[in-house]
Image (tube, rainbow, N blue to C red):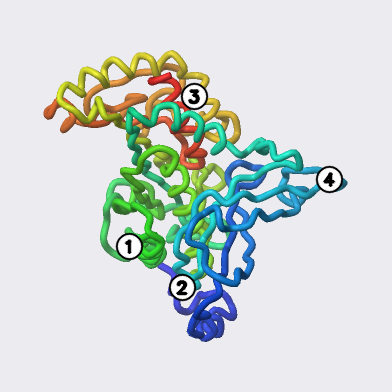
Amino acid sequence: MPNFERELPLGMANFGVFLGIPPHPTKCQATYIWIDGTGEHLRTKTRTLDRPPVKISEYPIWNYDGSSTGQAKGRSSDLYLKPVAHYPDPFLGGWSRLVLCETYDPEMKPTATNHRYTCKQIMDRVAAERPWFGMEQEYLLLDRDHYPLGWPKHGFPQPQGKYYCSVGSDRAFGREVVEAHYRACLYAGLTIAGTNAEVTPGQWEFQIGPVEGIAMGDQLWIARYLLHRVAESFGVVVSLDPKPNTTMTGEWNGAGCHTNVSTLKTRSPGGLEEIKRLLPKLGRFHQDHLRLYDPNGGRDNQKRLSGKFETSSANEYSFGIADRGASVRIPRQVADEGMGYFEDRRPSSNCDPYMVTGCIIAGTLL
C-alpha cells in the first residue's frame, strides 16, 4: 500500500499551511460545480461574493466557456450556470459554499447533459407519492498511472473474496481516501449512510440516502465531486468505469450504482404488493433504461451486466426476493415485513442519477 504522506503531490505540504489561514469573516468563496459534455465528469470554478447567500436564488447566474467542456462551438461558446443547490465547503470552511449548477445555452434552454431539468419536472409531478431514493456508488481507486491502487505492478492480486468489507494492509487499499471523503460528506450536510470496501481490490462504495426527489441526484453529484477532490489531495485517481478493461483482465466484479426506491405506498402496510405491481411496469422499458443508465448509451454497462459477478443479464429483465442476480431485487427484510423498497441493480457506476431516478419514477408512476 502506498505511503500517502510520502506520495502527496509536490507542494501539498505548503498548500496545507495556506489552508490554515482563517476563512474571511464575511466574504463567501462560492465554488460553482457543473456536469460537462461527457455527462460523466465535473467542472468547477470559484468566485468571491461579498456576503454569504442564505437562499439559492441569491447566487448570481454565471457563465463559462462551453467550447472547452464539449458543450458549445468556439464561435458561440458562452453558456450559463444556474445555481440550484448549495452546501458548506469542507475544504475552504467559513462561509464558503459548494454551488451545484444546471447548464443552459444562450437562449436559456437546458444543454444536452442537463438531465436535472427534466428529472425535476418528473419529481414535481409525483411529489404526493413522496419518492425516496438511496444510491450505492461503487468506484475503483487508481494510482496516477491509472493502475488499480494496491495491485502489483507486474501481476495481479490474489483472487477476489477476501477484499469485501476487509481490514488489513494486504487487502484494503486507500482507506485514507475513503475516511476523508466520508467526513467531507458529513461536513457538507449530505445524507451519507455509510461506506465499505467492495469485492474487487481497490474498489469501494459509499451510499447516499434516503433522500427525497430531486435531492437524490443533487447529493450524489456533490458526493462525487468531494470524492474526486479528496483523492486529488492524495495523488489518487477515482474511476467510475463500470468495467475497466485496460489492466483488469480476469475474474473481477465490475462497479454499479444500485438504486433503492420507495414511495409512500410501498413504505406503508401492504407495500410489498405495491412493489410487485410496480416492477412489471419497470420491465416494459428495460432496454430503453439500459441505454440511459450510463452516459455512453449503454455501452459501458454492457460490459458489466453479463449475468455473472452478482449482475443480471442485459438481455432480459427479472426481479425477485433476495436475488442479487436479478435486474431488480426485493430485499428479504422487505418481503418479511411486507413493505419497504426495491433495488434496481442495473445502473452503472458512471450513471447520471437524474437519468436513473427520473427513468424509474416515469416508468412506474407516470
Disc 2 marks which amino acid? Gly
Q: Judge from the rendering whether residue 129 lies leftward or rightward of residue 156; answer left or right.
A: left
At 49% from the left and 37% from the top, the residue drawn is 354
Quadrant of the image containing the N terminus: bottom left
Whole-Å distance between the Cαs marked 2 and 1?
A: 35 Å
Disc 3 marks which amino acid? His
Residue position marked by numbered label 3 in the rendering:
289
Disc 1 marks which amino acid? Asp
SS at mark 2 in the image: loop
At 40% from the left and 27% from the top, the residue drawn is 126
Q: Does the image show residue 351? A: yes
Closer to us: 284 or 122: 122
Residue 170 got which mark? 1
Whole-Å distance between the Cαs marked 4 and 3?
A: 33 Å
Mark 4 or mark 3, which has the lower sequence index? 4
Q: Residues within 10 Å of mark 3 (few under 14, many from 20)?
A: many
Whole-Å distance between the Cαs marked 3 and 2?
A: 40 Å
Q: Residues within 10 Å of mark 4 (few under 14, many from 20)?
A: few
At 71% from the left and 49% from the top, the residue drawn is 69
Residue position marked by numbered label 2 in the rendering:
93
Q: Can you tell which of label 4 and label 3 is closer to the viewer?
A: 4
Whole-Å distance between the Cαs marked 2 and 4?
A: 36 Å
Q: Can you tell which of label 2 and label 1 is closer to the viewer?
A: 2
Mark 2 or mark 4, which has the lower sequence index? 4
- The answer to whether mark 3 and mark 2 are in CB contact below 8 A is no
Residue 162 x, y percent position in the rendering:
28, 51
Residue 326 x, y percent position in the rendering:
33, 24
Disc 4 marks which amino acid? Ser
Mark 1 or mark 3, which has the lower sequence index? 1
Residue 76 got which mark? 4
